[in-house]
Image (cartoon, rainbow, N blue to C red):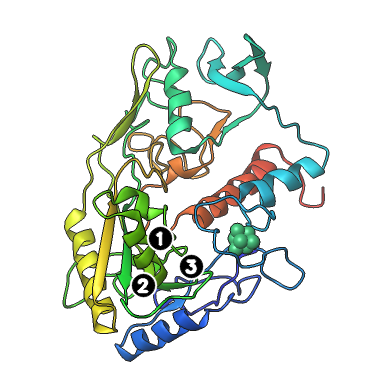
Amino acid sequence: MGTHGTAGADPIEPPRSGPFPYPTIGHEPEIEAIAEKLRGKGLRPFPLPIAIDRHKGGACVRCATCDGFACKLGAKNDAEMRLVRPALATGQVDLVLDTKVLRLITDASGKRITGVEIEQDGGTKVIEGDLFISSAGAINSSVLLLRSKNDTHPGGIGNNTSDLLGRNYMAHNNTAMMAIHPFRKNKVTFQKSMAINDFYLANHHRPYPLGNVQGLGKLQGGMLTANVKFIPEWAMDLFATRSVDWWIMSEDLPRRENRVTLDNDGTVRISYTPNNEKAHNELVKVWAKTMRSIGYPLIITQRMDITVSMHQCGTAVFGHDPATSVLDPFCKVWDVDNLYVVDASFLPSSTGFNPSLTIVAQGVRVAEHIARDVLKISAAA
Ligand code: SF4
């Protein structure tokens, strides 16, 4: 994915097989000054691993509208740029647009998927195949499998043994924070370059983890400000030019009751009650205190609710036991022989960090397994 970062800089980094493909993009002076102050407080800020094309010859110009926006220059290393477009360039992949996937169809035994029914040009038709992969995301993959219910899969495909399809929906506890110095402007352009994991693990002071703090793309009037209705826009603009902005993120825990369901008329419903809020609120307090201690007296926070639907995961958990998981360790649906779900659905926990690169890593692992063990494609081929 062309990720920039510094191996070993994250104090809780797990073992890794090698360095990042590209070095860290570095902090701008405002952020480096904050990193220095945080180090002075005994914290260990590190360069946030980030997948943009900022290496020599890359198209990234380090602009102010990266976080949460598509890149006009095609320099953000997302699924389209790094995976879909290169796949299409091989000439061996067809991308079918303007099409809605309605349901998967099984044979009479219910053990094999034989086709996928689609809606296209005002009509429906079936595409047949030998092997099927759903990568529609944690909500829509489970919706597709639920909608594909039939006599042999009355609760949806993949739901016969575990009753876990659509359950354990998770999406992180998130808070955006503006730490404001009233008399000093923050001239940073690309602010999302630093992260702090010093509160990620439990320790002897606190027997439970809090989460991760990372730089947020620089807020401008009309972004977060649109959500804070009680403060006039001119005042928020004033704050935004003087703030350092943070994204504060804690795990959301898997709960059976937090789930995706389908109404009889096909309406998709998400039932969700946030949890692990004590730890998250504590992290917000700890970070506000830290910011005040390094010279940012004014703090504005905005808790994100389910309408900010990012980092969704967990609705078709993988595992070693069909009784307690929907997918096997290679993301094949236990109940059928030729269907895989390869997206964020497999995650059994919401992870303490942004999940995209973990999802990609699992995708690569599953692809290698399918090529080697299922399709029997030799390494040489
Ligand atoms: S949006 Fe801006 S910072 Fe992000 S990849 Fe594109 S050019 Fe780079």
Quadrant (top left, top right, bottom left, bottom right) of the N terminus? bottom right
Element type where label 2 sits in the image? loop
Give the crowd class for mark 3: few <14, some 14-19, many >=20 residues within 10 Å.
many
Three-letter amino acid code at the position of disc 1: Phe
Nearest to the observer: residue 134 or residue 238: 238
Q: Is residue 272 visible?
A: yes
Q: Pointer 1: what residue?
A: 353
SS label for mark 1: loop
Q: Quadrant of residue 117?
A: top right
Identify the residue at image location x=39%, y=82%.
34
Can you give x and y, in whole percent of width and height, for residue 190 in the image?
53, 69
Q: Are marks 1 and 2 in contact (CB under 8 Å)?
A: yes
Residue at the spot of label 2: 197
Viewer-proximal residue among 14 and 276: 276
Q: Which residue is mark 3?
A: 192
Residue 350 visible from this viewpoint: no
Q: Amino acid at mark 2?
A: Asn
Q: Residue at x 33, y 83 (%)?
A: 43
Give the mark, 1 or 2, whose residue is nearer the N terminus: 2
